[in-house]
Amino acid sequence: MAPAAPAVPAAAGAVAAPAGAWAVLGSRRLVAAALLGFAAGAPLYLTGQLLVVWMGQSGVELETASAFAAVGLPYTFKWLWAPLLDRFAPPWLGRRRGWIVTLEGVIVLAIGGLAAVGVGGDVEVVAALAVTVAAASATHDIVVDAFLAESLAPDERAAGAAAYVLGYRAAMLVVGGGGLVLAAYVTWPAVYATAAALVAVGVIAVALVPEPPATAAPPTLASAIGGSLWDLLARPGAAPVLCAVALYRFGEQLVLHVQGYFLVSVVGVGVATVGWVTQGAGFAGLAAGGAVLGAVAPRLGPRRALFVFGGVAAAANLGWALVAHVGAPLPLFVAVAAVDAFGTALAAGAFVAFLMSQCAPGRAATQYALLNALSSVGGRALGFAIAPLVASLGWAGFFAATAAMIVPALATFAMVPRERFAGVASSPPA
């Protein structure tokens, strides 16, 4: 096996990192990341919660409405077709921006189709349109991840990740909550037509940021799949990198899985209160976390940011243990939700920046999708352990245990070679 070449930046040829924290926060690429996040989050409720409410008001039977839960499966399996987006490019605007504009066009047309057809029509047509929205939206997520990984300068990655999440959550508030409010005054087709127009804000982002520097596409689809996987596995320090990626979000995912159940069924908080507090206070916490992240992360550097912000997020998670002890009076509930979202924004931004730095130019769609899938598999596969943990530790002990789960993740990150934090280290050819 030939020795590995020296480390190079993840987005070779990308615009140089701006000088200073305020330059980072003022970057056009961060504005583009927020707009792309909004475009990515806008379709989510249109094939889920809002669609089911529309069906209920239109007299669609529960058996039919509940079957539409399967429409969201493309979001789970999107990594399967990510290599196609590395291998092939539209004949306009470049490999990344061309796919973004094309997919947003498909999303807008499919949402418009739902508005025109209505849920009371042919159920097969409605299902086909809903699946088209979900599949195109999931694919759009893949391309946006690759676009940001290849476009953001190293000092912008953490803040860019936070801006993307903030835009995504803003879209969920506007389309999810705002859509339900708007439906009380206008027709459901008008709600969907409005949402379709909102998706188009992603085109503004494409106009703000140029196509990432051109790199050679994988010569074959097999190379896009196997070559991308080999590139991840053959680099120095691959084992601790992959272990750290799998462990970093584990505790957070366990908490998110049962947070609503805990608040409603154990603490006794009303469903409406849970909704507006977790969305409103959570959004405020995310916004504050994103601002701090953009200002502080460039000074800390990628390694220290993972340690510091991971610790902050774990400590913030202990707020739920306090709620388990004393209950959830509204001021405490709002404070804990905001602080938890603040810590999550910090840790998630640093983590996503690290994932971006591990993606090789031209293979970012496949590699980011694989790393992102790896980061969530533990929480999904081991969710069955939640009940035994709560039974043995109690709810307060469970939340304390999930906070402690950051320790093995940080210990594994400590074993990652220092050069892996600077960007992609080339691997021997497959």
Image: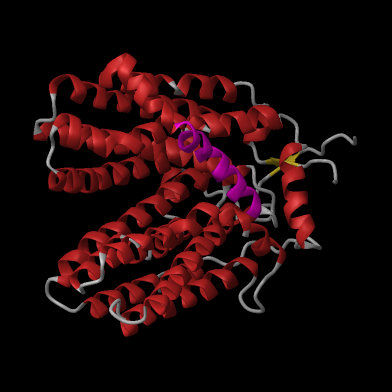
Q: Residue drawn 12% across and 71% down?
A: 184
In which quadrant of the rendered image does the N terminus lie? Answer: top right
Residue 291 position in % (x across, y down): 35, 44
**Looking at the picture, how far across and down is residue 75, in whole percent?**
48, 56
Q: Visible in this render: residue 97?
A: yes
Furthest residue toward right: 1
When asked about the image quadrant of residue 181, the answer is bottom left
Magenta-drawn stretch contains 372: yes
Let me know if residue 88 is in the magenta part. Answer: no
Measured from the top left, where is residue 149 in percent x and y? 58, 52
Task: Choose between 333 and 9: the one closer to the eye.
Answer: 333
Residue 19 in sight from this viewpoint: no
On the rendered structure, is 156 left or right of 314?
right
Residue drawn at point x = 18 percent, y = 37 percent: 264
Q: Which residues are magenta?
A: 366-382
* Left or right of 55 on screen, residue 197: right
Compared with 182, 376 (above or below) is: above
Q: Is residue 277 above or below residue 267?
A: below
In which quarter of the view is residue 316 placed? Answer: top left
The answer to which of 345 and 265 lies nearer the viewer is: 265
Nearest the viewer among 54 and 63 is 63
Question: Percent position (x, y) of residue 242?
Answer: 63, 33
Q: Residue at x 54, y 34 (%)?
A: 302
At 61% from the left and 46% from the top, the residue drawn is 370
